[in-house]
Image (tube, rainbow, N blue to C red):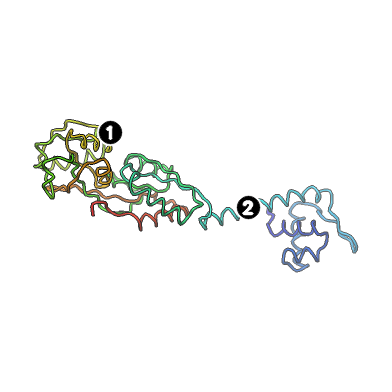
Amino acid sequence: MNVTVKQLKAFVAVAKTRSFAEAAELVYLSQPALSIAIKNLEETVGGQLLVRSTRTLALTPEGEAFYPVAERLLADWDDAMLELHNLFSLKRGKLSVAAMPSFASQQLASVLAEYRALYPDINVTVQDVVAEAVVDAVRSGRVEVGIAFLPDSAIDDLNFETLFDDRFVVALPPDHPLLDKQEITWNQLRSSSFIALQRPSSIREVIERTLEEKKFDLSIEFESHHLITNIRMVVCGLGVSVVPSLCIPQIEQLGGCWRPLKAPAIIRKVGIFTRKRYPLSTAATAMVEVLRKSVYPLDQ
């Protein structure tokens, strides 16, 4: 059954005013066009909704029953159009974002502050999860936008846009003898206790793969599941660690020190994940734009 909004508006206007002339003005139609709209509506529903004579205009019992329904349908239509307009104009909406902890605990907060200043009516939910889980959350559609390291595994079903290259740094306790160096090599770390993330961890994997290529072994004495725990152990003097430069603010806040790592350096791309073949919402598109303008490497 094909009833148009134009027909509903025509019927409601006539039912409200009981006058074709007044109704035509309300809906911005000529009287002949209004009559055709009513006629087509009655043909579609299969019976008369209005009884017309030279002096009176009344609703049939079916018309009386349909009148409040038509009003409600038009109100729902108007609400739906307003809601859709608000979504496109970013006056209303929801957005889910996933970010790895090293990014979420530092740069994401300032990104969200800028986003809120621009779009105060968008509700943003953040999933603070490890890099591998960020990719899974985007892939499954649980979030529209993810920020994490580019994984070594294939991501043919996802888009990835690089924000910056993260150069890993050495986290050191405040009294460590290597602090007199401007840069630190892996060979210089041999004599220090090493603190690493536990397996499975993409950061642990990239460090081990880099060292295997150089035929270099480290004596790992402490392990944990979280970078912040490793940094705390470093600050307490239990050893040194190699971490993403995204962790520099946490190192400094906890009273530790850091130096650039070289020979070899470890570099990983940090960027934005979205799903291929699935268009982003207006809210998500706006978030991507803010990320592009606001995010930068922390070791510069």
For the point 41% across and 51% down, the residue is 113
**What mark, if any, has residue 171 been given in the picture?**
none
Horizontal arrangement in the rendering, residue 40 relative to residue 248 (left or right)? right
* Left or right for 65, reference 181: right
Q: Nearer the viewer, residue 59 or 166?
A: 166
Helix, strand or loop for disc 1: loop
The amino acid pointed to by label 2 is: Asp
Residue annotated with mark 2 = 79
Query: Total of numbered circles in the picture?
Result: 2
Looking at marks 1 and 2 on the same chain, the residue that comes earlier in the sequence is marked by 2
Q: Position of residue 44 (x, y in %)?
A: 73, 54
Say few, some or many: other residues with alpha carbon within 10 Å of mark 2 (under 14 / 14 to 19 / 20 or more): few
> Where, by quadrant of the figure, is residue 140 drawn?
top left
Residue neighbourhood size for the residue with mark 1, other residues' Cα within 10 Å, grouped as few (<14), some (14–19), many (≥20): few
The residue most toward the right is 55
Q: Nearer the viewer, residue 183 or 101?
A: 183
Query: Does 40 appear above or below 258?
Result: below
Image quadrant in which you'd find residue 137: top left
Residue that label 1 marks = 225
Alpha-carbon span between mark 1 and mark 2:
49 Å
Q: Nearer the viewer, mark 1 or mark 2?
A: 1
